[in-house]
Image (spheres, rainbow, N blue to C red):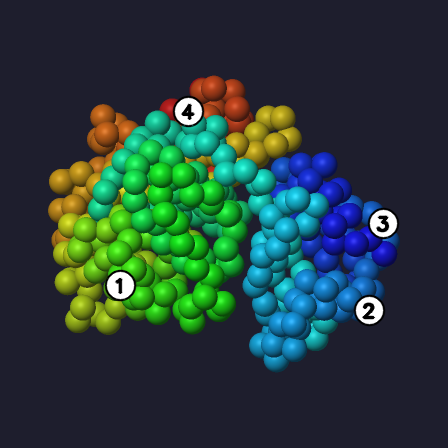
Amino acid sequence: MLSIVEMVEMAKEAGASDIHLICGIPRKYRLAGRLENMSEEVLTEEDCVKYAKELAGKEYDNFLEVGELDSADTFADNRCRIHIFKQQGIPSIAIRLLREEIPKLENLGLPPAVPELADLHKGIVLVTGETGSGKSTTLAALIDKINHSRKAHIVTLEDPVEYIYKPDLCAINQREVGKDTESFASGLRASLREDPDVILIGEMRDRDTIETAIMAAETGHLVFGTLHTGSAADSIDRMVQVFPEGMQNQIRLQLSMCLEAVITQQLVPDRDGGRVLACEVMRVTDAIRNLIRTGKTPQISNAILTSADMGGQTMDQALVKLVASRKISRFMATQYASDPEYIKKNAF
């Protein structure tokens, strides 16, 4: 039976992003967005239990009780994010291979306006998108740019800790939910007593976390966070809708004053069998602040169209640019667009 180290080495050599271990089928890894067999050997229940015990260690009994477990570890000199979960009573495992070094922002294919966000000193910056769209990598690159460019205190709240930062000009505390703090919300509240300049929240998943993040931004901190949303407008609505209806107008008002930018990412199949990043960027202008405050989020997409001078671009504009540069096909752009008709009219 292949060891975890051997599988990570194989995936790393092939350029895979994830490994999947599921009872009854061969080991698989994700190459350019598609699942491929690592071998033809079919995994048994005994194999999956053995892998789960090795990866969970002393937390295995907790996994059996709860049904899932998140962790991170290093195999074959490669940092990995691990998720163990039950399906039909049998352990399954998903392993995400993280980059050994934090990439430079300039090498991620992001629009020029994104690296500039590392120069902000207060407010909220969101990086959004579906699972596996590169949100963690973009955030890590932004945090690392700050680390190398100014003297500040950075506190991260992650579940689990993924990239390990090497402090340069900054002092950095990386706190793992479940190990170093009970929850994102409690860790975030505590962070405000830790004299931070920059706070990274791995996921803004509930009302307490969002409310405290807004308070942190209002009191002069720079807050980075993620959401699983597909556009800037969706992100604002998601944050507002976790609050009772009687509080929503107040939250819109607060967000309109402290939100600075929303980056939305998706990875689109390219012409060479790989994937390329498509990125929507919303820099919050006075016009957009007014739309947030008055609840007119459906009009935000049009407002982004007119903010090109600040580096703003919609997802559909990003897809049109990728078609024009021959990186993706016109057909593929329509599949990933919010408005396929816009692609058909503008992509050549």
Residue 118 horizontal side relative to residue 75, left or right: left
Q: Given the image, on which type of amino acid does mark 1 rest?
A: Arg
Q: Residue at image x 33%, y 34%?
A: 149
Circles 3 and 1, Cβ within 8 Å, touching? The answer is no
Circles 4 and 3, Cβ within 8 Å, touching? The answer is no
Which residue was labeled with disc 2? 46
Q: Given the image, on which type of amino acid does mark 4 rest?
A: Lys
In the rendered image, which quarter is residue 253 located in?
Answer: bottom left
Whole-Å distance between the Cαs marked 2 and 1? 47 Å
Question: Within 10 Å of the Cα at label 3, are there few (<14), some (14-19), or many (20+) other Cα atoms?
Answer: few
In the rendered image, which quarter is residue 81 located in?
Answer: bottom right
- Can residue 105 be seen in the rendering of this structure? yes
Q: Given the image, on which type of amino acid does mark 2 rest?
A: Glu
Which numbered circle lies on residue 40?
Answer: 3
Whole-Å distance between the Cαs marked 3 and 1? 53 Å
Which residue was labeled with disc 4? 321
Q: Which of marks 4 and 2 is in front?
A: 2
Which numbered circle lies on residue 107?
Answer: none
* Between 94 and 306, the one nearer to me in the picture: 94
Going from N to C along the chain, the mark reached first, 4 or 1, is: 1
Q: Given the image, on which type of amino acid does mark 3 rest?
A: Glu
Task: Tell me the element at label 3.
Answer: strand
